[in-house]
Amino acid sequence: MNEIAPIVPASGDKEATMPRKEPTQRRSKERVERILSCASTLIAQGGSDAMRMSDVAEMAEISIGSLYQYFPDKGSIIRTLAERYNALGRDCIADALQNVSDMNGLQASFAELIDVYYAMFLAEPVMRDIWSGTQADKALRDIDLHDSRLNGAVLADARSRINPAADRAALENSSFLIMQLGEATMRLAISVDRAEGDALVKNFKRMVLREMLVG
Amino acid sequence: MNEIAPIVPASGDKEATMPRKEPTQRRSKERVERILSCASTLIAQGGSDAMRMSDVAEMAEISIGSLYQYFPDKGSIIRTLAERYNALGRDCIADALQNVSDMNGLQASFAELIDVYYAMFLAEPVMRDIWSGTQADKALRDIDLHDSRLNGAVLADARSRINPAADRAALENSSFLIMQLGEATMRLAISVDRAEGDALVKNFKRMVLREMLVG
DNA sequence: TTGCAAATGTGAGGATTACTCATATTAATT
DNA sequence: AATTAATATGAGTAATCCTCACATTTGCAA
Protein backbone atom coordinates (compact mmCIF):
# COMPACT_ATOMS: atom_id res chain seq x y z
CA MET A 1 0.00 0.00 0.00
CA ASN A 2 1.86 3.06 -1.16
CA GLU A 3 1.36 6.56 -2.42
CA ILE A 4 -1.03 7.90 -4.96
CA ALA A 5 -3.22 6.08 -7.45
CA PRO A 6 -3.32 6.21 -11.21
CA ILE A 7 -6.83 6.79 -12.38
CA VAL A 8 -6.53 6.14 -16.08
CA PRO A 9 -3.70 6.68 -18.54
CA ALA A 10 -2.53 10.19 -17.73
CA SER A 11 -3.15 12.57 -20.60
CA GLY A 12 0.22 14.17 -20.89
CA ASP A 13 0.66 15.16 -17.26
CA LYS A 14 4.18 14.82 -16.01
CA GLU A 15 3.62 11.08 -16.20
CA ALA A 16 2.18 11.24 -12.66
CA THR A 17 2.22 7.82 -11.07
CA MET A 18 1.54 5.84 -14.20
CA PRO A 19 4.60 3.90 -15.32
CA ARG A 20 4.48 4.72 -18.99
CA LYS A 21 2.50 7.18 -21.04
CA GLU A 22 -0.53 6.61 -23.21
CA PRO A 23 0.18 4.53 -26.31
CA THR A 24 -2.38 3.02 -28.62
CA GLN A 25 -4.79 4.70 -26.21
CA ARG A 26 -7.67 2.46 -27.16
CA ARG A 27 -5.95 -0.73 -26.14
CA SER A 28 -4.41 0.53 -22.95
CA LYS A 29 -7.70 2.00 -21.82
CA GLU A 30 -9.42 -1.29 -22.42
CA ARG A 31 -6.73 -3.05 -20.44
CA VAL A 32 -7.12 -0.74 -17.50
CA GLU A 33 -10.84 -1.37 -17.53
CA ARG A 34 -10.39 -5.11 -17.77
CA ILE A 35 -7.96 -5.09 -14.88
CA LEU A 36 -10.34 -3.09 -12.71
CA SER A 37 -13.26 -5.28 -13.62
CA CYS A 38 -11.37 -8.47 -12.82
CA ALA A 39 -10.07 -7.01 -9.58
CA SER A 40 -13.64 -6.13 -8.68
CA THR A 41 -14.81 -9.66 -9.33
CA LEU A 42 -12.00 -11.12 -7.26
CA ILE A 43 -12.62 -8.75 -4.38
CA ALA A 44 -16.30 -9.61 -4.47
CA GLN A 45 -15.34 -13.24 -4.17
CA GLY A 46 -12.84 -13.21 -1.35
CA GLY A 47 -12.04 -9.67 -0.28
CA SER A 48 -9.10 -7.49 -1.22
CA ASP A 49 -6.65 -9.26 1.06
CA ALA A 50 -7.30 -12.52 -0.70
CA MET A 51 -7.02 -10.93 -4.13
CA ARG A 52 -3.63 -11.86 -5.52
CA MET A 53 -1.99 -9.80 -8.20
CA SER A 54 -1.22 -13.00 -10.11
CA ASP A 55 -4.94 -13.84 -10.10
CA VAL A 56 -5.84 -10.44 -11.45
CA ALA A 57 -3.28 -10.81 -14.24
CA GLU A 58 -4.47 -14.28 -15.10
CA MET A 59 -8.15 -13.37 -15.14
CA ALA A 60 -7.44 -10.26 -17.21
CA GLU A 61 -5.36 -12.45 -19.54
CA ILE A 62 -2.28 -10.32 -19.33
CA SER A 63 1.12 -10.98 -17.82
CA ILE A 64 1.96 -9.90 -14.33
CA GLY A 65 4.51 -7.53 -15.79
CA SER A 66 1.86 -5.76 -17.84
CA LEU A 67 -0.36 -5.48 -14.84
CA TYR A 68 2.39 -3.58 -13.07
CA GLN A 69 2.75 -1.34 -16.09
CA TYR A 70 -0.76 -0.05 -15.54
CA PHE A 71 -0.85 -0.07 -11.77
CA PRO A 72 2.34 0.47 -9.80
CA ASP A 73 1.17 -1.62 -6.89
CA LYS A 74 -1.74 -3.56 -5.51
CA GLY A 75 -2.98 -0.64 -3.45
CA SER A 76 -3.33 1.52 -6.52
CA ILE A 77 -5.94 -0.82 -7.98
CA ILE A 78 -7.93 -0.68 -4.80
CA ARG A 79 -7.61 3.06 -4.55
CA THR A 80 -8.82 3.49 -8.09
CA LEU A 81 -11.89 1.42 -7.34
CA ALA A 82 -12.44 3.39 -4.15
CA GLU A 83 -12.29 6.66 -6.02
CA ARG A 84 -14.80 5.46 -8.56
CA TYR A 85 -17.26 4.39 -5.92
CA ASN A 86 -16.77 7.66 -4.12
CA ALA A 87 -17.43 9.60 -7.29
CA LEU A 88 -20.73 7.75 -7.62
CA GLY A 89 -21.65 8.60 -4.07
CA ARG A 90 -20.64 12.20 -4.54
CA ASP A 91 -22.96 12.58 -7.51
CA CYS A 92 -25.75 11.00 -5.55
CA ILE A 93 -25.29 13.40 -2.67
CA ALA A 94 -24.93 16.46 -4.85
CA ASP A 95 -28.10 15.52 -6.74
CA ALA A 96 -30.04 15.06 -3.56
CA LEU A 97 -28.89 18.21 -1.79
CA GLN A 98 -28.17 20.73 -4.48
CA ASN A 99 -31.68 22.05 -4.72
CA VAL A 100 -33.10 21.78 -1.23
CA SER A 101 -34.18 25.13 0.09
CA ASP A 102 -35.99 24.46 3.33
CA MET A 103 -35.48 22.31 6.39
CA ASN A 104 -38.22 19.88 5.50
CA GLY A 105 -36.74 19.30 2.10
CA LEU A 106 -33.27 18.87 3.55
CA GLN A 107 -34.43 16.35 6.11
CA ALA A 108 -36.41 14.37 3.56
CA SER A 109 -33.53 14.31 1.10
CA PHE A 110 -30.99 13.38 3.71
CA ALA A 111 -33.14 10.64 5.13
CA GLU A 112 -33.49 9.15 1.69
CA LEU A 113 -29.78 9.51 1.09
CA ILE A 114 -29.04 7.46 4.17
CA ASP A 115 -31.37 4.73 2.98
CA VAL A 116 -29.81 4.70 -0.45
CA TYR A 117 -26.32 4.48 1.00
CA TYR A 118 -27.33 1.70 3.30
CA ALA A 119 -28.83 -0.22 0.41
CA MET A 120 -25.62 0.28 -1.57
CA PHE A 121 -23.53 -1.00 1.29
CA LEU A 122 -25.71 -4.05 1.63
CA ALA A 123 -25.65 -4.79 -2.07
CA GLU A 124 -22.04 -4.04 -2.99
CA PRO A 125 -19.49 -6.46 -1.57
CA VAL A 126 -16.63 -4.64 -3.24
CA MET A 127 -17.61 -1.32 -1.75
CA ARG A 128 -18.00 -2.93 1.64
CA ASP A 129 -14.59 -4.51 1.48
CA ILE A 130 -12.84 -1.37 0.36
CA TRP A 131 -14.55 0.83 2.90
CA SER A 132 -13.60 -1.57 5.65
CA GLY A 133 -9.98 -1.24 4.67
CA THR A 134 -10.33 2.51 4.69
CA GLN A 135 -9.28 2.91 8.29
CA ALA A 136 -6.18 0.79 8.07
CA ASP A 137 -4.56 2.12 4.93
CA LYS A 138 -3.29 5.66 5.08
CA ALA A 139 -3.70 6.45 1.40
CA LEU A 140 -7.25 5.10 1.41
CA ARG A 141 -8.10 7.06 4.51
CA ASP A 142 -6.84 10.22 2.87
CA ILE A 143 -9.09 9.60 -0.11
CA ASP A 144 -11.96 8.97 2.25
CA LEU A 145 -11.34 12.12 4.25
CA HIS A 146 -11.03 14.19 1.13
CA ASP A 147 -14.32 12.94 -0.25
CA SER A 148 -16.05 13.39 3.06
CA ARG A 149 -14.92 16.98 3.04
CA LEU A 150 -16.35 17.52 -0.41
CA ASN A 151 -19.63 15.91 0.59
CA GLY A 152 -19.62 17.78 3.86
CA ALA A 153 -19.23 21.03 1.95
CA VAL A 154 -22.28 20.21 -0.16
CA LEU A 155 -24.29 19.54 2.98
CA ALA A 156 -22.95 22.68 4.60
CA ASP A 157 -24.03 24.66 1.54
CA ALA A 158 -27.55 23.36 1.82
CA ARG A 159 -27.73 24.07 5.53
CA SER A 160 -26.28 27.49 5.01
CA ARG A 161 -28.89 28.25 2.38
CA ILE A 162 -31.63 27.29 4.80
CA ASN A 163 -30.14 29.13 7.72
CA PRO A 164 -27.95 31.95 6.45
CA ALA A 165 -27.30 33.21 9.95
CA ALA A 166 -25.44 30.08 10.99
CA ASP A 167 -21.68 30.19 11.32
CA ARG A 168 -20.22 28.73 8.19
CA ALA A 169 -17.16 27.13 9.77
CA ALA A 170 -19.28 25.45 12.40
CA LEU A 171 -21.67 24.15 9.75
CA GLU A 172 -18.79 22.74 7.79
CA ASN A 173 -17.30 21.01 10.79
CA SER A 174 -20.63 19.56 11.76
CA SER A 175 -21.40 18.43 8.22
CA PHE A 176 -18.03 16.77 7.82
CA LEU A 177 -18.60 14.94 11.07
CA ILE A 178 -22.03 13.82 9.94
CA MET A 179 -20.61 12.38 6.72
CA GLN A 180 -17.93 10.47 8.57
CA LEU A 181 -20.30 9.20 11.22
CA GLY A 182 -22.66 8.13 8.46
CA GLU A 183 -19.94 5.97 7.00
CA ALA A 184 -19.12 4.58 10.40
CA THR A 185 -22.76 3.73 10.91
CA MET A 186 -22.89 1.91 7.58
CA ARG A 187 -19.79 -0.10 8.40
CA LEU A 188 -21.27 -0.95 11.74
CA ALA A 189 -24.67 -1.83 10.38
CA ILE A 190 -23.30 -4.36 7.95
CA SER A 191 -21.21 -5.98 10.68
CA VAL A 192 -24.22 -7.05 12.69
CA ASP A 193 -27.33 -8.95 11.75
CA ARG A 194 -29.80 -7.32 9.46
CA ALA A 195 -32.46 -6.43 12.03
CA GLU A 196 -30.00 -4.78 14.37
CA GLY A 197 -28.32 -3.03 11.47
CA ASP A 198 -31.64 -1.59 10.36
CA ALA A 199 -32.33 -0.34 13.86
CA LEU A 200 -28.91 1.28 14.11
CA VAL A 201 -29.34 3.08 10.81
CA LYS A 202 -32.76 4.27 11.87
CA ASN A 203 -31.33 5.53 15.13
CA PHE A 204 -28.54 7.34 13.37
CA LYS A 205 -31.01 8.92 10.99
CA ARG A 206 -33.06 10.26 13.86
CA MET A 207 -30.00 11.62 15.57
CA VAL A 208 -28.68 13.36 12.49
CA LEU A 209 -31.97 14.86 11.42
CA ARG A 210 -32.32 16.39 14.83
CA GLU A 211 -28.78 17.67 14.69
CA MET A 212 -29.50 19.43 11.42
CA LEU A 213 -32.72 20.85 12.76
CA VAL A 214 -31.33 22.14 16.02
CA GLY A 215 -27.97 22.94 14.83
CA MET B 1 -4.50 -12.35 11.13
CA ASN B 2 -6.43 -15.39 12.23
CA GLU B 3 -8.81 -16.61 14.85
CA ILE B 4 -8.85 -16.11 18.56
CA ALA B 5 -6.19 -14.73 20.87
CA PRO B 6 -4.38 -16.23 23.81
CA ILE B 7 -4.49 -13.88 26.73
CA VAL B 8 -2.05 -15.47 29.08
CA PRO B 9 -1.07 -19.10 29.69
CA ALA B 10 -4.39 -20.89 29.89
CA SER B 11 -5.01 -22.41 33.29
CA GLY B 12 -5.94 -25.90 32.35
CA ASP B 13 -8.68 -25.12 29.85
CA LYS B 14 -8.80 -27.48 26.94
CA GLU B 15 -5.53 -25.89 25.84
CA ALA B 16 -7.62 -23.27 23.97
CA THR B 17 -5.49 -21.47 21.41
CA MET B 18 -2.26 -21.59 23.35
CA PRO B 19 0.21 -24.06 21.85
CA ARG B 20 1.32 -25.70 25.05
CA LYS B 21 0.14 -25.58 28.63
CA GLU B 22 1.53 -23.72 31.59
CA PRO B 23 4.98 -24.84 32.70
CA THR B 24 7.23 -23.13 35.16
CA GLN B 25 4.42 -20.59 35.23
CA ARG B 26 6.65 -17.82 36.52
CA ARG B 27 9.01 -17.87 33.58
CA SER B 28 6.43 -18.29 30.89
CA LYS B 29 4.35 -15.50 32.34
CA GLU B 30 7.34 -13.22 32.32
CA ARG B 31 8.03 -14.14 28.73
CA VAL B 32 4.51 -13.36 27.65
CA GLU B 33 4.81 -9.99 29.34
CA ARG B 34 8.15 -9.28 27.75
CA ILE B 35 6.80 -10.19 24.34
CA LEU B 36 3.83 -7.90 24.74
CA SER B 37 5.95 -5.08 26.02
CA CYS B 38 8.41 -5.36 23.13
CA ALA B 39 5.57 -5.59 20.63
CA SER B 40 4.12 -2.46 22.14
CA THR B 41 7.39 -0.61 21.77
CA LEU B 42 7.77 -1.69 18.17
CA ILE B 43 4.21 -0.74 17.31
CA ALA B 44 4.74 2.65 18.91
CA GLN B 45 7.78 3.09 16.69
CA GLY B 46 6.46 2.08 13.30
CA GLY B 47 2.94 0.73 13.53
CA SER B 48 1.76 -2.84 13.63
CA ASP B 49 2.27 -3.45 9.93
CA ALA B 50 5.93 -2.58 10.25
CA MET B 51 6.34 -4.73 13.34
CA ARG B 52 8.08 -7.92 12.27
CA MET B 53 7.82 -11.08 14.29
CA SER B 54 11.58 -11.49 14.03
CA ASP B 55 12.05 -8.06 15.58
CA VAL B 56 9.79 -8.91 18.46
CA ALA B 57 11.71 -12.11 19.10
CA GLU B 58 15.04 -10.36 18.93
CA MET B 59 14.02 -7.52 21.22
CA ALA B 60 12.49 -9.95 23.69
CA GLU B 61 15.69 -11.98 23.49
CA ILE B 62 13.97 -15.21 22.63
CA SER B 63 14.02 -17.29 19.49
CA ILE B 64 11.36 -16.91 16.87
CA GLY B 65 10.25 -20.45 17.63
CA SER B 66 9.61 -19.59 21.25
CA LEU B 67 7.65 -16.54 20.23
CA TYR B 68 5.32 -18.78 18.29
CA GLN B 69 4.97 -21.02 21.29
CA TYR B 70 3.36 -18.20 23.21
CA PHE B 71 1.43 -16.57 20.41
CA PRO B 72 0.16 -18.66 17.52
CA ASP B 73 0.36 -15.81 15.06
CA LYS B 74 1.11 -12.13 14.71
CA GLY B 75 -2.53 -11.17 15.00
CA SER B 76 -2.82 -12.82 18.38
CA ILE B 77 -0.24 -10.45 19.85
CA ILE B 78 -2.13 -7.47 18.54
CA ARG B 79 -5.45 -8.84 19.73
CA THR B 80 -4.07 -9.39 23.19
CA LEU B 81 -2.91 -5.80 23.34
CA ALA B 82 -6.27 -4.64 22.04
CA GLU B 83 -8.10 -6.57 24.72
CA ARG B 84 -5.94 -5.10 27.42
CA TYR B 85 -6.56 -1.58 26.26
CA ASN B 86 -10.25 -2.31 26.00
CA ALA B 87 -10.31 -3.64 29.51
CA LEU B 88 -8.79 -0.39 30.72
CA GLY B 89 -11.42 1.60 28.86
CA ARG B 90 -14.19 -0.61 30.16
CA ASP B 91 -13.14 0.02 33.75
CA CYS B 92 -13.00 3.73 33.06
CA ILE B 93 -16.50 3.75 31.64
CA ALA B 94 -17.96 1.58 34.36
CA ASP B 95 -16.41 3.80 37.02
CA ALA B 96 -17.79 6.91 35.45
CA LEU B 97 -21.31 5.67 34.81
CA GLN B 98 -22.03 3.13 37.51
CA ASN B 99 -23.28 5.60 40.03
CA VAL B 100 -24.93 8.35 38.03
CA SER B 101 -28.55 8.75 38.97
CA ASP B 102 -29.80 11.83 37.18
CA MET B 103 -29.47 13.35 33.75
CA ASN B 104 -27.14 16.11 34.82
CA GLY B 105 -24.78 13.62 36.37
CA LEU B 106 -24.92 11.40 33.31
CA GLN B 107 -24.17 14.25 30.96
CA ALA B 108 -21.32 15.51 33.07
CA SER B 109 -19.78 12.05 33.41
CA PHE B 110 -20.15 11.25 29.76
CA ALA B 111 -18.70 14.55 28.67
CA GLU B 112 -15.69 13.91 30.83
CA LEU B 113 -15.42 10.37 29.52
CA ILE B 114 -15.21 11.67 25.99
CA ASP B 115 -12.41 14.02 26.96
CA VAL B 116 -10.51 11.29 28.72
CA TYR B 117 -10.81 8.96 25.75
CA TYR B 118 -9.70 11.67 23.39
CA ALA B 119 -6.67 12.37 25.55
CA MET B 120 -5.85 8.67 25.59
CA PHE B 121 -6.08 8.45 21.84
CA LEU B 122 -3.81 11.43 21.45
CA ALA B 123 -1.28 10.08 23.91
CA GLU B 124 -1.18 6.37 23.05
CA PRO B 125 0.33 5.57 19.67
CA VAL B 126 -0.16 1.86 20.20
CA MET B 127 -3.83 2.25 20.94
CA ARG B 128 -4.22 4.49 17.93
CA ASP B 129 -2.55 2.01 15.66
CA ILE B 130 -4.53 -0.94 16.88
CA TRP B 131 -7.84 0.86 16.76
CA SER B 132 -7.16 1.94 13.24
CA GLY B 133 -6.67 -1.65 12.24
CA THR B 134 -9.92 -2.53 13.94
CA GLN B 135 -12.02 -2.06 10.86
CA ALA B 136 -9.88 -4.13 8.56
CA ASP B 137 -9.29 -7.25 10.63
CA LYS B 138 -12.31 -9.38 11.32
CA ALA B 139 -11.13 -10.80 14.62
CA LEU B 140 -10.23 -7.34 15.89
CA ARG B 141 -13.56 -5.98 14.79
CA ASP B 142 -15.33 -8.73 16.68
CA ILE B 143 -13.43 -7.84 19.82
CA ASP B 144 -14.30 -4.21 19.27
CA LEU B 145 -17.98 -4.92 18.72
CA HIS B 146 -18.10 -7.13 21.77
CA ASP B 147 -16.57 -4.49 23.99
CA SER B 148 -18.79 -1.78 22.58
CA ARG B 149 -21.77 -3.90 23.48
CA LEU B 150 -20.54 -4.26 27.03
CA ASN B 151 -19.92 -0.55 27.31
CA GLY B 152 -23.20 0.19 25.61
CA ALA B 153 -24.97 -1.95 28.18
CA VAL B 154 -23.40 0.04 31.00
CA LEU B 155 -24.58 3.26 29.41
CA ALA B 156 -28.01 1.80 28.79
CA ASP B 157 -28.20 0.82 32.46
CA ALA B 158 -27.47 4.37 33.52
CA ARG B 159 -30.01 5.83 31.13
CA SER B 160 -32.56 3.27 32.17
CA ARG B 161 -32.04 4.17 35.80
CA ILE B 162 -32.64 7.81 35.00
CA ASN B 163 -35.63 7.17 32.79
CA PRO B 164 -37.22 3.85 33.80
CA ALA B 165 -40.06 4.34 31.33
CA ALA B 166 -37.80 4.19 28.30
CA ASP B 167 -37.78 1.06 26.18
CA ARG B 168 -34.80 -1.00 27.17
CA ALA B 169 -34.05 -2.44 23.74
CA ALA B 170 -34.13 1.00 22.18
CA LEU B 171 -31.80 2.33 24.85
CA GLU B 172 -29.38 -0.47 24.26
CA ASN B 173 -29.36 0.04 20.53
CA SER B 174 -28.85 3.76 20.93
CA SER B 175 -26.12 3.32 23.50
CA PHE B 176 -24.26 0.79 21.40
CA LEU B 177 -24.41 3.20 18.49
CA ILE B 178 -23.11 6.02 20.65
CA MET B 179 -20.12 3.94 21.75
CA GLN B 180 -19.26 3.02 18.19
CA LEU B 181 -19.69 6.54 16.90
CA GLY B 182 -17.54 7.76 19.74
CA GLU B 183 -14.74 5.52 18.56
CA ALA B 184 -15.25 6.65 15.01
CA THR B 185 -15.03 10.25 16.15
CA MET B 186 -11.77 9.57 17.97
CA ARG B 187 -10.26 7.89 14.94
CA LEU B 188 -11.36 10.80 12.82
CA ALA B 189 -10.16 13.44 15.23
CA ILE B 190 -6.62 12.06 15.32
CA SER B 191 -6.52 11.91 11.52
CA VAL B 192 -6.83 15.65 11.11
CA ASP B 193 -4.94 18.52 12.66
CA ARG B 194 -5.33 19.18 16.31
CA ALA B 195 -7.61 22.22 16.12
CA GLU B 196 -10.04 20.56 13.76
CA GLY B 197 -9.94 17.38 15.80
CA ASP B 198 -10.82 19.30 18.94
CA ALA B 199 -13.74 20.93 17.17
CA LEU B 200 -15.01 17.59 15.89
CA VAL B 201 -14.88 16.03 19.33
CA LYS B 202 -16.68 19.03 20.78
CA ASN B 203 -19.33 18.75 18.12
CA PHE B 204 -19.79 15.07 18.75
CA LYS B 205 -20.10 15.68 22.45
CA ARG B 206 -22.84 18.19 21.91
CA MET B 207 -24.68 15.85 19.59
CA VAL B 208 -24.49 12.91 21.96
CA LEU B 209 -25.45 14.79 25.08
CA ARG B 210 -28.55 16.00 23.32
CA GLU B 211 -29.31 12.51 22.12
CA MET B 212 -29.17 11.23 25.67
CA LEU B 213 -31.33 14.05 26.91
CA VAL B 214 -34.00 13.83 24.24
CA GLY B 215 -33.79 10.35 22.85
C1' DT C 1 7.28 -2.57 -48.42
C1' DT C 2 11.13 -2.71 -45.47
C1' DG C 3 13.87 -1.60 -41.60
C1' DC C 4 14.59 0.63 -37.43
C1' DA C 5 13.61 2.75 -33.03
C1' DA C 6 10.50 3.40 -29.45
C1' DA C 7 6.85 1.56 -26.85
C1' DT C 8 4.83 -2.59 -24.63
C1' DG C 9 4.55 -7.29 -23.20
C1' DT C 10 6.46 -11.23 -20.69
C1' DG C 11 7.37 -14.41 -16.78
C1' DA C 12 11.24 -16.35 -14.28
C1' DG C 13 13.22 -14.89 -10.29
C1' DG C 14 14.46 -11.51 -6.28
C1' DA C 15 13.03 -9.96 -1.82
C1' DT C 16 10.41 -9.91 2.23
C1' DT C 17 8.06 -12.15 6.05
C1' DA C 18 4.88 -14.97 8.54
C1' DC C 19 5.26 -19.34 10.22
C1' DT C 20 6.99 -24.65 10.82
C1' DC C 21 9.54 -28.53 12.39
C1' DA C 22 13.34 -31.59 13.39
C1' DT C 23 16.55 -31.37 16.79
C1' DA C 24 18.83 -29.74 21.06
C1' DT C 25 18.30 -28.32 25.67
C1' DT C 26 16.35 -27.91 30.10
C1' DA C 27 13.26 -29.30 33.84
C1' DA C 28 10.46 -32.75 36.42
C1' DT C 29 9.96 -37.29 38.16
C1' DT C 30 11.01 -41.80 39.60
C1' DA D 1 21.17 -41.27 37.74
C1' DA D 2 18.12 -42.28 34.30
C1' DT D 3 14.09 -41.44 31.91
C1' DT D 4 10.50 -38.84 30.35
C1' DA D 5 8.17 -34.63 29.42
C1' DA D 6 8.34 -29.79 28.47
C1' DT D 7 10.34 -26.04 26.17
C1' DA D 8 13.90 -23.55 23.18
C1' DT D 9 16.07 -23.00 18.85
C1' DG D 10 16.81 -21.16 14.10
C1' DA D 11 17.48 -22.88 9.49
C1' DG D 12 14.21 -23.65 6.22
C1' DT D 13 9.39 -23.44 3.79
C1' DA D 14 5.72 -21.03 1.67
C1' DA D 15 3.17 -17.34 0.05
C1' DT D 16 3.24 -12.97 -2.39
C1' DC D 17 4.40 -8.58 -3.99
C1' DC D 18 7.08 -6.67 -7.31
C1' DT D 19 11.36 -6.14 -10.74
C1' DC D 20 14.06 -6.47 -14.75
C1' DA D 21 16.44 -8.33 -18.70
C1' DC D 22 14.85 -9.69 -22.78
C1' DA D 23 11.17 -10.64 -26.47
C1' DT D 24 7.55 -8.74 -29.20
C1' DT D 25 4.76 -5.37 -31.31
C1' DT D 26 3.82 -0.85 -33.18
C1' DG D 27 4.62 3.55 -35.51
C1' DC D 28 7.05 5.79 -38.93
C1' DA D 29 10.54 7.18 -42.39
C1' DA D 30 12.81 6.01 -46.46
Image: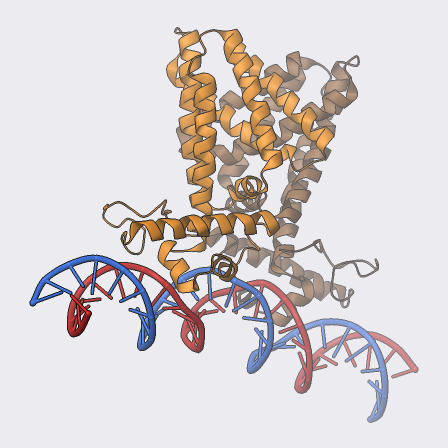
Chain colours: A orange, B brown, C red, D blue
Quick one: C8 or A125, which is closer to the camera?
C8
Residue A120 as seen in the image, left or right of residue A98: right
Q: Is residue A119 visible?
A: yes
Residue A104, position in %: x, y?
Answer: 53, 7
Query: Count the marks: how many?
Result: 0
Residue B112, position in %: x, y?
Answer: 58, 25
Taking the spot 66% from the left edge, 26% from the top edge, the residue there is: A200
Which corner quadrant of the image does residue A73 belong to?
Answer: bottom left
Quick one: A172 or A120, which is closer to the camera?
A120
Residue D12 as seen in the image, left or right of residue A150: right
Residue B62 as seen in the image, left or right of residue A199: left
Taking the spot 69% from the left edge, 36% from the top edge, the residue there is: A192
Q: Is residue A215 visible?
A: no
* In the rendered image, the vertical position of residue A117 relative to residue B212, given as above or below: below
Quick one: B35 or B50, which is closer to the camera?
B50
* In the rendered image, the vertical position of residue A44 relative to residue B35, given as above or below: above
Residue B64 as seen in the image, left or right of residue B154: left
Residue D20, position in %: x, y?
Answer: 32, 71
Taking the spot 72% from the left edge, 19% from the top edge, the residue there is: B159
Residue B176, position in %: x, y?
Answer: 68, 29
